[in-house]
Amino acid sequence: MKAKSAVEYPLLERLQSWAVALLVLVGAALVLKPVKDVCWEAVQAGQAELRVDSLNESVGQGVVLGVLGGLRSLVADFAWLELNRKWEARDRAGLGAMIQLVTSIDPRPEFFWINSARMIGYDVPHWRIAEAGGYGLVSETEQATINMEQAMQALALLDQALSYHSGSARLKLEIGQIYLNRLQNYELAADWFLKATKEKDAPYFAGRVYADLLVRLHREREAYAFLKELYLNLPEDPMAQGDIVLERIRELEERLGLAGEAVFHSGAD
């Protein structure tokens, strides 16, 4: 008699999958209980953020990563779902604790760090201003203070991320964007965009933004020299947008009075 394959028992197969998933969840809950207790204590104490070093001190150095082993990614994904619930509820204390929990469990995905920093730096300021009465009642000085505080917290988180991903262009760009968009500090924004351009995974736009920031800082000659070097090293790739880089070079030649001297030739004129 021919044995029936597992495919012929779809209900049994589903039950097996559910059983495995349930075991994983129960195991994860048991492993994470000491970590969860520390985070909840921080929330109850009203702490806006929970530091990873204090977490490790409370549950044992390295125990979070060591105990979870191969379950790190799965447990971190479930924790991320809980983090998003805190975000949707605008629970600032809970959000801060969950961010530290998620990035402690699995610091490898840049996604966790970048999106957490955006929540802290871009969303939380609006929540705080709304809690204080809204933009109509909160003075511009108070708003600036809130924006500064949240931007600095986001920067601290991204700095922590760099200890795991020191060569990440994405993280360096995120830092540069906070300095640019939240703090209007063009000098530091330019520094971080330049750092990003030096990484292997740097997107093409990073160099163009860096040059634009130099122009904002009235450092046109530096921008011109940088764009010339950038253009000469661009690959034959439409995504590199060499025509835009060349256009900006020409604009700077006009501004610097260099156009008539034909200082830079693209070879395509």
Image (cartoon, rainbow, N blue to C red):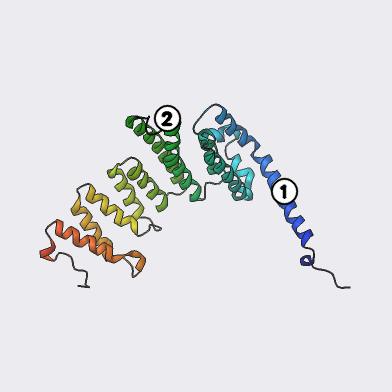
Picture residue at 46% right of the left edge, 47% below the top: 114
Picture residue at 42% right of the left edge, 42% below the top: 122
Residue placed most toward the observer, 215 or 70: 215
Quadrant showing the C terminus:
bottom left
Q: Residue 38, labelled with which disc?
A: none
Q: Earlier in the sequence, mark 1 or mark 2?
A: 1
Residue neighbourhood size for the residue with mark 2, other residues' Cα within 10 Å, grouped as few (<14), some (14–19), many (≥20): few
SS class of the residue under badge 2? loop
Residue at far front of view: 136
Asked if 4 appears above or below 11 in the picture, the reply is below
Left or right of 77? Residue 201 is left
Asked if 170 appears above or below 5 in the picture, the reply is above
Picture residue at 35% right of the left edge, 41% below the top: 182
Picture residue at 22% right of the left edge, 54% below the top: 223
Q: Residue under circle 2?
A: 133
Q: CA distance from mark 1 to mark 2?
A: 45 Å
Residue placed most toward the observer, 198 or 115: 115
Disc 2 residue type?
Answer: Gly
- Tell whether label 2 touches label 1 (CB within 8 Å): no
Quadrant showing the N terminus:
bottom right
Left or right of 72? Residue 212 is left
Left or right of 221? Residue 65 is right
Whole-percent x, y for residue 225 in the image: 21, 57
Q: Residue under circle 1?
A: 22
Whole-percent x, y for residue 263 in the image: 15, 64
